[in-house]
Every structure is written in C-alpha cells, then in structure tokens.
Image (cartoon, rainbow, N blue to C red):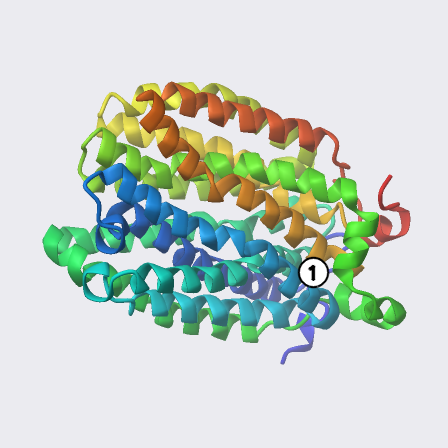
Amino acid sequence: MPESRDTLSDRSDGNGDKKSLVRLLVASTSGNTIEFYDFFLYASATALVFGKVFFPSDDPLTSVFLAFSVYAVGFLSRPLGGVIFGHIGDRYGRRTALVWTLLLMGASTFAIGLVPPYAQIGAVAPALLVAIRLIQGIALGGEWAGAVILVAEHVSDKKRGLWTSIPQIGAPLGNLISAGVLFLLGAIMSNASFEAWGWRVAFFLSAILVCIGLYTRLRIDETPLFKQNQKDSGHRRKKLPLAEVLKNYKRETLVVMFYRIGENTVYYIFTIFLIVYTTDILHLPKGVALAAIMVGSVVQALAFIAGGAWSDRIGRKKTILLGMVGLVVWSFLYYFMVNTKSTGLIILAVCVGVALHGLIVGPAAAFVLELFGTDVRFSGASVGYQIGGVLGGAIAPLIAIKLLQNYHSWVPVAWYLAGVCVLAGISVMFGTEGRGKSFEEIDAAHKPGD
C-alpha cells in the first residue's frame, strides 16, 4: 500500500497527495452510491410493483400503503445499525465498518430479488421482505457516517464542507441509477413481464456493484486521525462510545435528530412519494416520475457540492437555514406544478425541490461531524442521524398517503412538509458552528452537554 494514504493531505492547508485524495473520494462515494442504489431500489420498486406483487388489494393506495409499511421497517433498524457500526467504527476503525456495511447491504438486496410473490407462497412473502429489510436497514445505518468521516478525517479543515459533501452525492447517484435501471427495464418489456420478473433483474445487478465497491474500499487505509487517537487515547477505547454519547452529547444528538427529520421527510416526499402521487393519483405513466427523479438526481448532486462549498465560506448553519426557508415556500409551489400533469413542469418542480434539499444536505456532514469528538464521532453521528431517519423518511410516505386518503388534497401534504422544515431549522440554530475549526481544536475545546 502506498505510504501516502497514511498522510493523505496536510490537514492545515489542504495540500497533499491529489491522487490519494481522488482514491479516497472515489472509495467513499462509490460505496455510498451502491448502498443507496440498493436501498432506493427497494423504495422505487415499492411504489411501482411491490404493492401488486406482495400485497394484492382492490384499493391501489391500500396496497401501496402496506408495501411502504414494510419499506419503513428498513428505517426502524437503522438506529441499530448506527449503534453496531458506530461501535465498530469508533473502536476498530472507520474502514472496517464500511467494508461490512457494504457486504451486508449487497447480500440483502440480492436476496430480495429471490423472494417469491404472494401468489406463490402467501403471507410468507411479505414476512421474508420484512426480515431482509431489517438487514438492509442495519447495513445502511452505519454507511453515511462512515463514508463522510473517512473523508473528513483526512482532508483540509478549511475545505471540510466541500470535501465531505462529495460522498453524500452517493444518495442521489444511487437513486439515479436505480430509477434509470427500472426505467430501462420498464421501457424494454411489457408491464406484465416487468411486474412478473423484470424488476428482479435490478436487484440481482447489486452483486456486480458491490464487487466494484469492495475493490475501491479495500484499497483505502484507515484515517490518520483515528490512528493517532488510538495511540494518544488508548484508555478511552475501553469505554462504550454509545454510552459516552448518551451521557455527554445529549443536545448534539437531538440537534442532529431533528435536523434529519426535516431533511429526510423532504427528500422522500419529493422523490419516492412523487411516484405514488403521479401514478396512482394523477394516473400518469411511471416513466414521468422516474424521468423527473433521474434529472433531479443530477441537479441534486451538484447542489450537494455547492452547498458544501458555500458552507466553507458563510458557515454550515447559515447555508442549511437558507435552504430550509426556500423549502418552506417550495412545498406549496411544488404541488401546483406537479398537478399541471406537464412532464416539463414536473421535472422542473422536482429539480428546484431537490436543489434546495441539496443546500441543506451539502453542509450536513461537516455540521454533524463537528458536533462530536473523535472518540465518539462515528457513534454520535450515526445514532442521531438514523433515529431522525426513522421519524422522517420512514413515516413520511405513510403520512402523505394517509393525508391524501383522508383529505383528497395535496394541501395537507404541503403543510406537513413546511412544518418539518421549520422544526429542522429551529434545531440547527441550537447546533455549534464548526466552520474553520480543526478536529484537534474541537476535541480540545468542545465541552459535551453544554
């Protein structure tokens, strides 16, 4: 292994081995992309076919609601994954945790493609989905924090917002690839073939992607900061990182959790719920929503990077709050545009929505990681983030579907979106601004629980 990986960059000014930096970014981003491909593939397939295949019903929205209930199970197990892999990452290394999250996610996604439909094995089919979704959620629970920490603990303090925004584009890229694969499969085969077996092909492709991700991650060494922390603070490693988080970082954990509720709700309403709304309510072809999500994913990825870079200039909190204000307004304009049934306006609505979402996510990695000390950074970032995901993305589609069923209008959904954005914005205001500070300074000066 090249020695440069141990000293990837001069963290005081950001100058260092550019080749190693590129390798690091590729490893963290590609693995994150693959994991989110797997997770979003299930979400997209849930909106398109799982209701019919595994939860047949006379009411399409009821079938979709039941399918999304199983989808939510994947979120419920995320905090457990955050605890497990947070412990591994804080005690045994960031890279070790990331390799195992990727293997676990890949195996569970491939297994979903093997589950027989309800028509063949009855209630056993959804039961198998629940079990596999639990495993998926555990895997993803440790992915986000590990991917961004791997980068953050290598790079320049002055450009931490920019560099840590790059691994996060794995989410929109994963969504782009999963939507693209489903779009292609749906285009080259009949609806009957797609619902019968075509969707399974997308899940089997995960095996190839996982091999690529493992190759890139196994070529990356552990972070210099983690290694140094092991040498300097060996006695701390005997403690349970989670216990220290719960004891000394209560406020920080709550800040992350409520921020995540708003961010995750916005994302899943603007993307996954869009598929349900356009196909089951507006009765548009599934390709319309998938096309909007694919185009929007590219815009969102760019917005992530722009948001991260901007946060290095004006601060993490200011950037996130600007995005939240924009989302409150766009929550209502979004549905006005979608209800025109114009493909162009739907794509525009999604693009603006996910661009604003990118402004609040781009700085998020740096903002969250700067709240916690090195000893507990993986655990602290994972637990609050994943609990917020349960209360945000897990239930957002379910709440939106019920609001539509009860009120037969998109207006309550828009108010729901605006409300969680306000809640998230308030939480961010209670966080500590870490722009420009080194992790060494944060470790020395940060006083947990203040």
Q: Where, quadrant-wise, is the N terminus in this rendering? A: bottom right
**Where does the image place residue 242, in percent across and percent down from the top left?**
74, 58
Quarter residue 262 falls in: top right
**Where does the image place residue 446, in percent across and percent down from the top left?**
86, 46
Identify the residue at image location x=37%, y=46%: 68
**Where does the image place residue 357, in percent across and percent down from the top left?**
50, 34
Q: Nearer the viewer, residue 116 or 188?
A: 116
Left or right: where 321 falls relative to 264: right
**Where does the image place residue 97, in percent across and percent down from the top left?**
61, 69
Tell me if mark 1 has few (under 14), some (14-19) or many (20+) residues whose alpha carbon lies within 10 angstroms of its own: many
* Amino acid type shown at disc 1: His
Q: Which element is circle 1 on? A: loop
Q: Residue furthest bottom?
A: 1
> Residue under circle 1?
154
Left or right: where 363 falls relative to 251: left
Identify the residue at image location x=52%, y=39%: 392
Q: Where, quadrant-wise, is the C terminus in this rendering? A: top right
